[in-house]
Image (spheres, grey):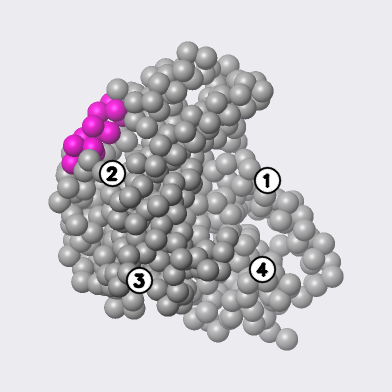
């Protein structure tokens, strides 16, 4: 019997989530039907992440479970895609010989063809080649029914080679899509009911830097701001060294650009930043924060911080704590440093003991919790426009949505508001979310 249903398990970041959406689109166009349960699927795809050790370990343990599953269901087609697939290449088939395919980050557009070939008795496929033109960048996907938010990839890859990061090795060099393609895709999404787009790229600030590309990132934002039907524009991720005055000005000028930026600092110590090869000092980072806040005083700023980078001393860590005090981030993603195979910092001296890393992480996270709660408390009594995303996971009587500043708000309301923007008065603050009450008769759109 030919395969009919597929299941995708996604690990990692928004780029991976969008890659899975794109594969689902291609498989749907080829006649396969998506299922939310692996046990009902004829095809199981694991979309892997190798940026952090934890995500890689989770993917490996999922594969361990699938090995047993395949023993009892030999007809199920199984494969891995994504960053870990790109990194391990055919070694993946040696480690997991029950897999039918391994597709790297530049080859997900082949998914339907590869599965069709295997279903007709073909041998396992490994394709981790890099292409100068990444064909998966422009695959159009509509959001799930009821959702009005969509991801749009504008560029892929990275040329920065931060010493700890595996991304340039597994996603390749920077490549930007043509602005006309992006504008066309967002127009298409708007005509299908999308109101909010999140522009994706490993370093969106270097969008358009290649020789064949036409406009830079702030110009692209200005073009998207003109698209009828789109109300909110977000983007991720930004590199501080590439954040220009022109981009900061876009936060002041463009009404649809949401007042939130994720700007990874990684450390507050210049010594550590130099060894990370980040290309800026702590002082330069703070200057960018001043620039952003001058353009948009109410901007919400989030960040990534790594603790325990090789050679990080107590005084370096203290500089990170000091920087957090100066910026007062709305939220951060924080991690203990972990060697990634093949990166420069894998060979660095001065590895920090796990116990010290954990102590620093605990201290840093408790400081951030204090800052997050203070920031959220500042919003109490304010009225925020909330784009309703769905029913709250904690109570079916509640809806959940996001403010323009990317804060999660829970409030009582009917499910027919999902997909709409409503005014909500903030009545309570938690560390990771807000409580609110909707203003009566206040649907905005
Ligand atoms: S900028 Fe640095 S951390 Fe970000 S993807 Fe590129 S190499 Fe990795």
The residue identified by callout 3 is 420
Residue 308 seen in render: yes
Q: Earlier in the sequence, mark 3 or mark 1?
A: 1
**416 or 276, which is in the foreground?**
416
Q: Earlier in the sequence, mark 4 or mark 3?
A: 4
Residue drawn at 64 percent across, 82 percent down: 4
Residue 204 point in image, percent of width and height = 32, 48
For marks 4 and 2, give the one nearer the viewer: 2
Residue drawn at 48 percent across, 45 percent down: 430
**190 or 105, which is in the foreground?**
190
For the residues marked 4 and 3, what is the alpha-carbon distance in whole angstroms? 34 Å
Q: Disc number at residue 197?
A: none
Cβ–Cβ under 8 Å for marks 2 and 3: no
The residue identified by callout 1 is 57
Secondary structure under tag 2 reads: loop
Q: Earlier in the sequence, mark 1 or mark 2?
A: 1
Q: Disc number at residue 299?
A: 2
For marks 3 and 1, give the one nearer the viewer: 3
Residue 443 in which image quadrant? bottom left
Secondary structure under tag 4 reads: strand
Q: Earlier in the sequence, mark 4 or mark 2?
A: 4
For the residues marked 3 and 1, what is the alpha-carbon distance in whole angstroms? 38 Å
Q: Main secondary structure of the magenta part?
A: helix
Q: Is residue 101 magenta?
A: no
Residue 400 point in image, percent of width and height = 46, 62
Residue 19 seen in render: no
Q: Local crowd at mark 1 within 10 Å, few (<14), some, or many (≥20)?
A: some
The residue identified by callout 4 is 44
For marks 1 and 2, give the one nearer the viewer: 2
Q: Earlier in the sequence, mark 1 or mark 4?
A: 4
Secondary structure under tag 1 reads: helix
């Amino acid at each position: 019997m030919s395969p009919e249903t597929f299941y995708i398990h996604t690990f990692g970041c928004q780029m991976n989530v969008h890659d899975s959406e794109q594969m689902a689109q291609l498989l749907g166009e080829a006649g396969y039907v998506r299922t939310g349960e692996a046990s009902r699927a004829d095809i199981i795809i694991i979309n892997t992440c190798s940026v952090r050790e934890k995500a890689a370990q989770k993917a490996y343990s999922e594969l361990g479970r699938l090995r047993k599953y395949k023993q009892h269901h030999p007809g199920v087609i199984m494969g891995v895609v994504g960053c870990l697939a790109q990194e391990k290449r055919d070694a993946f088939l040696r480690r997991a010989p029950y897999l039918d395919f391994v597709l790297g980050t530049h080859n997900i557009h082949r998914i339907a063809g590869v599965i069709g070939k295997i279903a007709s008795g073909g041998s396992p496929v490994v394709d981790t080649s890099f292409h100068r033109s990444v064909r998966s960048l422009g695959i159009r996907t509509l959001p799930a029914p009821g959702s009005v938010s969509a991801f749009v990839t504008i560029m892929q890859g990275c040329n920065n080679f931060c010493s700890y990061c595996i991304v340039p090795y597994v996603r390749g060099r920077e490549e930007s899509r043509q602005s006309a393609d992006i504008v066309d895709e967002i127009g298409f999404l708007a005509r299908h009911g999308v109101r909010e787009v999140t522009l994706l790229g490993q370093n969106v600030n270097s969008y358009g830097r290649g020789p064949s590309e036409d406009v830079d990132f702030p110009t692209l934002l200005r073009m998207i701001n003109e698209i009828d039907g789109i109300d909110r524009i977000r983007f991720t991720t930004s590199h501080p060294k590439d954040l220009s005055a022109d981009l900061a000005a876009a936060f002041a000028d463009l009404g649809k650009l949401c007042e939130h930026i994720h700007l990874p600092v990684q450390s507050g110590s210049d010594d550590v930043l130099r060894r990370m090869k980040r290309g800026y000092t702590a002082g330069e980072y703070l200057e960018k924060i001043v620039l952003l806040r001058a353009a948009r005083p109410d901007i919400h700023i989030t960040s990534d911080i790594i603790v325990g980078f090789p050679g990080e001393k107590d005084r370096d860590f203290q500089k990170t704590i000091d920087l957090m005090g100066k910026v007062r981030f709305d939220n951060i993603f924080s991690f203990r440093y972990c060697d990634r195979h093949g990166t420069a910092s894998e060979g660095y001296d001065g590895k920090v003991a796990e116990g010290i890393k954990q102590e620093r992480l605990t201290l840093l996270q408790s400081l951030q919790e204090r800052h997050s709660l203070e920031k959220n408390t500042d919003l109490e009594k304010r009225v925020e426009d909330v784009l309703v995303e769905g029913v709250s996971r904690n109570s079916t009587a509640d809806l959940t949505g996001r403010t323009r500043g990317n804060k999660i708000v829970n409030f009582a309301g009917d499910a027919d508001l999902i997909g709409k923007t409503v005014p909500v008065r903030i009545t309570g603050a938690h560390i990771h979310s807000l409580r609110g009450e909707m203003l009566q008769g206040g649907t905005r759109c």
